[in-house]
Amino acid sequence: MNCMPCHLFVRKLHGVLTKQYGPTFSLSYYPLKTLINVSYKKKNKKIPTKPYKTLITVRCNNSVCYSRVGYGKSLKLLSQLLFVSMDSDGSNSGRKRRKNADDSGNNRASKRGREDKLAVDDSVPPVKKTPSTKATETTRLEHVETSDSYLSNTRFDQFPLSPLSLKALEDAGFKTMTVVQEATLPIILKGKDVLAKAKTGTGKTVAYLLPSIEAVIKSPPPASTDKKKPSIIVLVVCPTRELACQAAAEAKTLLKYHSSIGVDVLIGGKKLRAEQRRMQKHPCRILVATPGRLIDHIDNTPGFARRLRGVKVLVLDEADHLLDMGFRRDVERIISAVPKKRQTFLFSATVPEEVRQICHVALKQDHEFVNCVQEGSDETHQKVTQMYMVASLDRHFSLIYMLLKRHIAENVDYKVIIFCTTAMVTRMVADLLGKLSLNVREIHSRKPQGYRTRVSDEFRKSKSIILVTSDVSSRGLDYPDVSLVVQMGLPSDRKQYIHRLGRTGREDKEGEGVLLLAPWEEYFLSSVKDLPITKASLPQTDPEAVKKVKKALRQVDMKYKEAAYQAWLGYYTSQKKIARGTTRLVELANEFSRSMGLSIPPAIPVNVIDKMGLKNVPGLRVAPGS
């Protein structure tokens, strides 16, 4: 089906009918028309025949999914089977509503008390009827109950996958599919384009890699003249280097027994010539790349554009993030570089207007929309406890230290991610925590790509470790068993807060998130007031901990502090509500400087001050000779 509520509705309908009347019902899917036909044996006397003449169309309430589900059932009988009641006013308007019947003996409600609800409303635009849709009424599917678990009961071996792929899955510990894998795989294996919406940490990478590998297996081997430069069959485009490396590593895991299928990754931060030599020496059939580096190779690598003309599967991973980062033109150029006759998958955590627009360019008109995020469901993981603390800047470093010490004491296998506002603040905080004898690693944009990849792999495999990072780690990366996420300072927006928090609570596990703000940053809380985030009381000041932090701050490299001060000022200059008063902004920056143990704020080059729009603002020190 086009989205998860529709998919689950049909499964629930089939289950209820089978339970009620035995195995006399069967469901037939019509992907092109998104219709379901309920058939039955007429000899069964338990089933009245007349009510089945009515064909009802259910229209999904999702703003992107326009699927229609047809079933040969009368409204009255169906409402009884689905444990809902229906009132008809008999008016000409045809308005009918269904509400959940009270069922005191049935505890099927989810943890947050969500209810199943089918509603028919004449305010909904009518569904255009096709010859195959003999609908007498138009109804609207508002909500279908889904499980809170990200796993399904469906096994991988229930689908026509290569035995070697199944063996690799078994070796990797994959037993049953996730919900997004269960929903997308049957559609993709039929050769359809897919737009899939799913939360982070729900198995999206495997969902698109498995059928992609099948496409390579079914492709004819390269001709003898093309063996040195065979066509690329699968092209995966990721927004960040870390995500591309992660996807490539996942592909290698699934290709464990497919020795003849090569996979390669092209990312920025590495020499173009080195990648060209590697591709020439080890030609691949599956390529994972970031947009910018892919364009570099299209323009500068001989024969590369020709290899892309053999692409049969194009994947745009984290499509919303690709567009958020300003890659739209690059994405459109990449789409134009691959054949029109191909299969395309877009996987995204959200489906904003920009993603819908790119769908018109990338996907076929009859593509399927698979929505694994139920309408009205929580944007953050339910098993993640969210808290925020508000304290003056001079307390932030000691609070972070006390928070970490407490968490380490309570969790033997702790795994913590601390998000900072900028790369230079990240470097300074990592150095500080290292001076406090904590097991710390750092990742940010100023680190070379090789270092970032090594640290990312180490953190993924390790326990009892802390990662201090900028937002390069906020999207898509799969770090298992993260027990705590700390966001230090103001997130750029609500979306960023949610994506950062999504690094914990993955694979249906529990997690904890803490947002640490200064009093003048509290306005951000209004943007997340609908999320289950609660205020945490500040721990009692520990004089010994404060003393240790002050001593460690004195040991932090002065260059790190100076760079952090300048980066901090630049970041908050971009925050309109704070930067509205430039004098106040500089005062806050100098407060941050004092929190690092500096009595005098660092001097800033005059050209940097001009770029920030802070020329002649009192409180700023201009670097001499700049």
Image: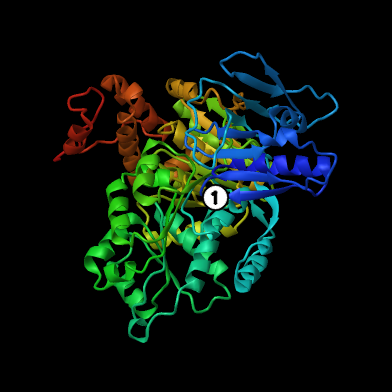
**Nearer to us in this view, 5 or 252:** 5
Q: Is residue 199 visible?
A: no
Q: Residue at x 49, y 23 (%)?
A: 525
The residue sitting at the left extreme is 625
Element under disc 1: loop
Q: Measured along the vertical axis of the image, is residue 511 above or below residue 578?
A: below
Q: Measured along the vertical axis of the image, is residue 128 above or below residue 253?
A: above
- In the image: residue 216, left or right of residue 412: left
Q: Is residue 311 visible?
A: yes
Instruction: Please tell me in which quadrant of the rendered image residue 600 appears.
Output: top left
Say which residue label 1 marks: 31
- In the image: residue 79, left or right of residue 607: right
Which x, y percent locates residue 444? 40, 49
Instruction: Please tell me in which quadrant of the rendered image residue 343 appears.
Output: bottom left
Query: Which amino acid type corresponds to the residue marked 1 in the rendered image?
Result: Pro
**Nearer to us in this view, 389 or 392:** 389
Which x, y percent locates residue 613? 20, 29
For the N terminus, the image quarter is top right
Which x, y percent locates residue 298? 26, 64
**Nearer to us in this view, 185 or 368:** 368
Q: How is the image coloured?
A: rainbow
Q: Residues within 10 Å of mark 1 (few under 14, many from 20)?
A: some
- In the image: residue 36, left or right of residue 597: right
Which x, y percent locates residue 225? 33, 85
Q: Residue at x 60, y 57 (%)?
A: 462
The residue sitting at the bottom extreme is 224
For the C terminus, the image quarter is top left
Q: Residue at x 55, y 45 (%)?
A: 34
**Nearer to us in this view, 538 or 114:** 114
